[in-house]
Amino acid sequence: MTDIDILMPQDWSFPIPIAYGPGRLAEIGNRCVAMGLSKPMIVTDRGSRNLPFIAKLQKYLKDADLESTVFSEISPNPRDDEIAKGRTEFRIGRHDAVIAIGGGSAMDGGKSICLTANNSIDLWAFEWEKPPITVTADEQFPTLITIPTTAGTGAETESTAMVTDTAKGMKFCICHPDLKPSLAILDPELTVGLPANLTAWTGVDAMVHAIEAYLVPGFNPLCDGLALEGLALVSHWLPVVMREPENLAARGGMLAGSCLAGISFMQGLGFVHAISHMVGAEYDTQHGLTNAIILPVVLRYNLPGMEDKVKRMADAMNLADTSPDAFIATIVKTLDDLNIPRALTEIGVPADCIERIAEKAMQDSAAATNPRVASFDEMCALVETAIIKAR
């Protein structure tokens, strides 16, 4: 695949309509008109509210004679009270769509608001472990459009969202099978200005998604193929984009790899996310960075006995040595090259939360699809290692 190939605009129809390519954001106004929309609500996070892509998005909508407002009261780890406020703003503004733009928190915030915007259903009724709730004809979800501005979360093609339950101090996954984004715009130009640390953290997040999804037990060749191709793209382009942050092809490769990895984890994740979710819920840490720190700890636990799967991941990354030890060593070197902290203590997570985080992590939906079961004591050991010295 050449740079020319990666920079060529593409329209993909799987698993949802995706407009990929530099400059595709400019189409948003006409696409909204074609969908019959008149007043979308833009949802983003607090840190993105004043970034240029928000003003650019609103200009494109205005040029198409569409009115829009911005809701930006979303934390790095979205909270249930923020979603409730967003639902109120959606109703007061009489909006007919949500455009979620930004990183993973903006995606999760926008999707969560969509789930509750047109009904009186409690947010937690949509929790992943519960049977899908019935939504009546007059409670249908508003149109959802997703526009990622980071290459990491891969959250743009599904309705799943991670939200913090403020009463329990835990993150839960919420979704509904009837809510699907009507359009995702993958525009590499939107990621060019991303700071180096966020490029690294979100890039490793995509890598974690691909690795954990591929290690999920069971037969799912579709997700497995997406995970391996996502891993191949991210492992190739992440070093390039760190060296050459203005390289649009590298940004495009990362955005496509992130998207594939995000689709692949519909079959599940593992202990990296189970622990990271609960750390983020309590300490509001950046999700990709938290995943990156925890990754080698969980790999050392999971990979013994998984030589066949490790070999396929190593092949996707073009590694000469395909053993589990060499694979882990490559991951560790990647994290070192990206200046990822070596312990959760370095990002403000104290050592006195080990048992509490371990107990919550074992209840996380991602823990159920980890390839190796852990006892409570084993989970405590993983959490303790991640906090004190992950690598």
Image: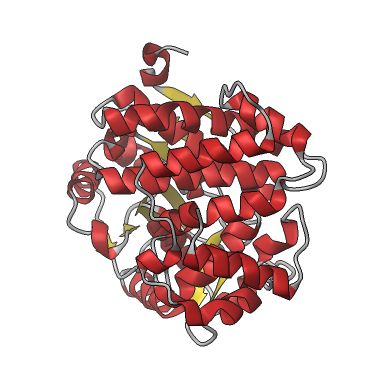
- The mark tally for this picture is 0
Which of the colour schemes (rainbow, by chain, secondary structure, one colour) is used?
secondary structure
Image height check: is 55 above or below 326? Answer: below
State which quadrant residue 190 falls in: top left
Q: Position of residue 84 (x, y in %)?
A: 42, 78
Answer whether residue 312 is visible to the viewer in this image: yes
Image height check: is 325 above or below 43? Answer: above
Answer left or right for 208 relative to 200: right
Q: Position of residue 155 (x, y in %)?
A: 50, 50
In front of the other: 61 or 211: 211
In front of the other: 276 or 104: 276
* Residue in the image at 53% along x and 74% along y: 119
Answer left or right for 281 relative to 66: right
Q: Position of residue 192 (x, y in %)?
A: 26, 36
Answer left or right for 241 relative to 158: left
Answer whether residue 118 is visible to the viewer in this image: no
* Residue in the image at 26% along x and 27% along y: 244
* Residue in the image at 46% along x and 26% along y: 236
In front of the other: 248 or 346: 346
* Residue in the image at 42% along x and 14% along y: 5
Judged from this view, the residue extending furthest toward the bottom is 167
Q: Position of residue 331 (x, y in %)?
A: 52, 40
